[in-house]
Image: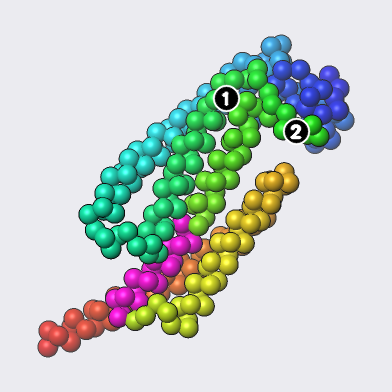
Amino acid sequence: MACENDFSCPGTLVCYTDVSWDERDAFCDCSTYYGWENLASNCTDYGPGTKFYISTASIVMIVSGFFICIALSDMSLFYHFPEARKLSKGVVTFIYCFLGLLSQVFLGAVQLGSATSPLESLKVDEFSEEKLAKYGIAERFFGMAELCFVFLASLNISLVWLELSNKINRMSTNTASSKKYQRIVYAFQFGFVAIALVGVTLGFFYISAIIGLPYIIFLLYIYKRGHDEFSSVLKNALAASDNNQY
């Protein structure tokens, strides 16, 4: 069946154009995203891919929910220890991780809702030619929220290391070197989130792949720096301990 866009195709079928694995220019076929299959029923039957998708989404949602329960129990520290109520680097990282887990639970829920509702498609806006599942927009929102919070938490860990190592060394985190490093991390966090939000708003989801590489490189750098900071602290502590013994 020839097509112009996704909505030219019946049921859950989507429009494929200029693909390398078929000689036709534009044709309707089953979408592989949720694993629905059987052209005779307009691709509304659950295939092996659908069952795998539902299983993994359920498992990830349950595991995330388990860690949320642990996080909620840890929040009791905020009431018992006034020091924990301050927005230190560790507390901010904890908040980012909690929000990331919460986003993952909601993402899993809407993924299950979409995978189990093959007959319901959604048009993004009047100019869109893309056919989304029932909760497709919600999936994109919670997926991007999870990505942003996990990214912020993973970068903020290096600031926790810096804060802790400086405290162990009885140094101030307000030194010129520390301030410069913190500004770099904050700038990278803001830049990543801003670019990701603009990309999602405009529908350019491939941007996440483009900014993924520099993110990984920067993450390796800050983890290496954190490793060096703590190695230095531990070596100095061990040397001091050996000197005290004599």
- Please give the name of the residue rendered at 50% of the width and 51% of the height, measured from the top-left corner: 149
Name the residue carrying label 2: 125
Of circles 2 and 1, which is in front?
Answer: 2
Q: Quadrant of residue 128?
A: top right
Judge whether 157 appears above or below 198 on screen. Answer: below
**Residue 60 part of the magenta segment:** no
- Please give the name of the residue rendered at 57% of the width and 25% of the height, measured from the top-left corner: 115
Q: Amino acid at mark 2?
A: Asp
141 horizontally vs 6: left or right = left
**Residue 154 part of the magenta segment:** yes
Judge whether 164 appears above or below 126 on screen. Answer: below
Q: Quadrant of residue 27?
A: top right
Q: Amino acid at mark 1?
A: Ala
Q: Quadrant of residue 67?
A: top left
Which of the image's four quarters has the N terminus? top right
Region rendered in magenta: 153-170
Disc 2 is placed on an element classified as: loop
- Percent x, y of residue 234: 29, 75
How much space separates mark 2 and mark 1, taking CA atoms?
21 Å
**Mark toward the start of the polypeptide (2 vs 1):** 1
Asked if residue 107 shows in the view, the reply is: yes
- Percent x, y of residue 180: 52, 78
